[in-house]
Image: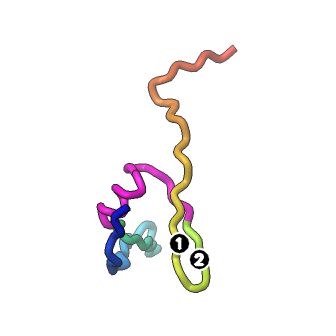
Amino acid sequence: MISLPRLVVRLQEKSWVRDGKRYRTYHVTLPKPFVDRLGLEKGDRLEVRLEDGRIVYIPRPRRPSTRGRQTTLF
C-alpha cells in the first residue's frame, strides 16, 4: 500500500445571521487522495472524536438505501 503524505488543511468557517442571531459552523476539507483511499462517497457519515488533543474521524458503515424501493403498509 502506498503511503499518503502528511497534509495540512485549513479550518474554515461558515456564518450567517437569522432572526438577529449569528450562527457559525466549522469544517475542514478532506484531500481527495484520502477520500479515495478510504472509499468515501458524498453523504457518507463520519464519527468525530477528540482523543488526546487530536481530532479523529472514523468512517461509519453505510446504511442501506431505501430510495426507489416500494414499501407496502398493512
Q: What residue do we see at 36% from left, 66% from top?
A: 30
> SS of the residue at dot 1?
strand
Where's the C terminus, which quadrant? top right
Q: Are marks 1 and 2 in contact (CB under 8 Å)?
A: yes
Q: Is residue 46 magenta?
A: yes
Residue in front for this viewpoint, 22 or 2: 2
Q: Amino acid at mark 1?
A: Val
Q: Earlier in the sequence, mark 1 or mark 2?
A: 2
For disc 1, the marked residue is 56
User: Which residues make up the magenta segment?
Assistant: 31-47
Outermost residue toward the right in this view: 74
Outermost residue toward the front in this view: 1
Residue in front for this viewpoint, 74 or 58: 58
Q: On residue 50, which mark appears?
A: 2
> SS of the residue at dot 2?
strand
Q: Quadrant of residue 32?
A: bottom left
